[in-house]
Image (cartoon, rainbow, N blue to C red):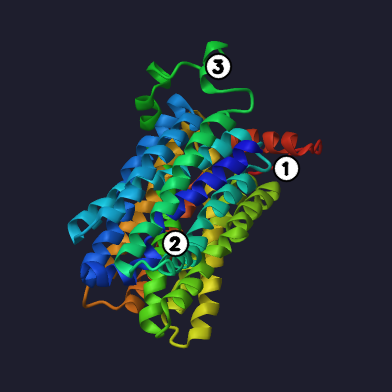
Amino acid sequence: MRAFHFSWFAFHICFFGWFGIAPLMAIVRDDLGLTKTQIGNTIIASVAITVIVRLAIGVLCDKIGPRKAYSWLLCLGSLPVMAIGLASSFETFFLARLAIGAIGASFVITQYHTSVMFAPNVVGTANATSAGWGNLGGGTTQILMPLIFSGILMLGVNEALGWRLAMMVPGVVLFLVGIAYYFFTQDAPNGNFDELRARGELPEANGDHGMGQSFKAAAKDIRVWALFVVYAACFGVELTINNIAAIYFFDNFDLTLATAGVIAGLFGLMNIFARTLGGVFSDLFARNGGLKGRVRWLFIAMLCEGVALMFFSQMHVLALAIGIMLVFSLFVQMAEGATFGVVPFVNKKALGAVAGIVGAGGNAGAVAAGFLFRSESLSYQQGLFYLGIAVVIASLCALVVRFSPEVEAEEEVAYREAAGDDSPALSLR
C-alpha cells in the first residue's frame, strides 16, 4: 500500500509539472506574443517527447525496478519545470515544454509498480485508482495554478514574472517527492530487484531477459498495438482536453481566467472516481466473463466516450457544455482504467515493455490530436467533433485483443484463488 500511495501521489505531482503552464497559457500568450499555431505546437511538444520516454521507461523498469526509475525521473524532470521560467521567446518556451514532457513517462512506472504489487482479482482496480488519482493532477492543476499565480501577483509582482515564479512551485515539489520515493518504497512485495536477483528469485536483466528481448516480445504482439491505438483514443484525448480546456472556455464563453480554470479543472477532477470505476468494472466483468469480459467492457467504454465527445463539441450553452463535458470525462477515464485492466495479462514476462508501448500510445494520440487544434482554419469545436469520430473508430481495436483458451483458464484459476473462491471454474469457451 505504501507503493500504491507513493506511486499515485508522484504521478499526481508530475501532472502539476507537466500541465502547470496550461491554465496560465492566456497570460503566457500575451507575454510572449504567441499565435494559435505556436500554442498548438507547444501543446504537441508537451506530449511528443513522452512517446519516446515511455517506450524506454517500461523496459528500464524491467531492468532496474520502478523505485530507482521513478526517483531519477522525478528529480531530473523537476529541472525543466523550474527552468521554463527562463523562456523569453517562442523557441525557448517550446524547448522547455518539450523537455518537461519527459515526466509524463511517470504513468508507465505507476502502472508497472501497482501491477507488480497487487493480485489478479484487484489489479484492475489498483491500476485504475493509482492512475486516476494521478490524473487527478490534471484537474487540481487547472484550479490551483491560477490561485498560486494570483497569490504571487498579490505580492506586487507583475504578470510576466508571476507565471514564471508560479512554475517554481511544482518543480521544487517534484524534486522532493523523487527523494522520498527512493527511501520509502520498494520494487516488489518481497524486496527490491537487486535483492531478488542476489537471492536468485529474479533472473538477471540480460540475455533472454534483457531490455531488448523484453521490448521485442511486446512489439511483435498485435494485441499490444491494438491497445496502443485504444489508449491513444482515451488518454490521448484526456491530455488534449487538459491542454485546451481552460483557453477553450476562456475564449468561447467569455469567462475570466480563474473561472475557466475551475470549469476545466472539473474535467480532471472526475479522476477521483471515474478511472477507478473503469478498473472496478473491469474486475467485475472478469468475475463472470474472464479476460473476454475485460475486453468487452473496454469496447463499451470507448464507444460511449466517442459519442459523448461528439455531443460535447456541439454545445453552445455553458451549462450544457459543462454537463456533457462531465459525462464525456466519465467515459474517457473509465476507458483508461479498462485499458490497464487488460494490460497486466497480455505478457507478464515483458510487463514493462507492454505498459511502455501502450502508455506511449496515449501520448501519440495526444500528438495526433494536437494537429487538429493548431490550424487557424479549424475551430476548436470542429476539432473536437472530428476527434469524437476518431474515438468511435478506434474503439473497434479493442475487439482485436484476444487470449488463448489456456491463458484464459489459467487466469481464471488465479483470479479465483486470489479472491478466495473455491467454486468450480466457469467454462470460458
As drawn, the label of residue 195 is: 3
Dot 2: few (<14), some (14–19), or many (≥20) neighbours within 10 Å?
many
Q: From the viewer's perspective, is the residue at label 2 or at label 3 nearer?
A: 3
Q: Which residue is mark 1?
A: 426
| Residue 54 in picture, x, y percent from top left | 38, 42
Check disc 1 and report its element: helix, strand or loop: loop
**Along the line of sight, the residue nearer the viewer: 63 or 244:** 244
Please give left or right for residue 99 compared with residue 77 in the image. Answer: left
Distance, label 2 to label 1, CA atoms, is 37 Å
Distance, label 3 to label 1, CA atoms, is 39 Å
| Residue 338 in view (yes/no) | no
Q: Amino acid at mark 2?
A: Glu
Q: Quadrant of the N terminus?
A: top right
In the picture as drawn, the residue positioned furthest to the top comes out as: 199
Q: Residue at x 54, y 39 (%)?
A: 344
| Residue 153 in picture, x, y percent from top left | 40, 68
Q: Residue at x 39, y 85 (%)?
A: 254
Q: Which residue is mark 2?
A: 238
Dot 1: few (<14), some (14–19), or many (≥20) neighbours within 10 Å?
few
Earlier residue among tags 3 and 1: 3
The image shows residue 85, relative to residue 2, as above or below, that is below
Check disc 3 and report its element: helix, strand or loop: helix
Q: Amino acid at mark 3?
A: Glu
Please give left or right for residue 197 compared with residue 54 in the image. Answer: right
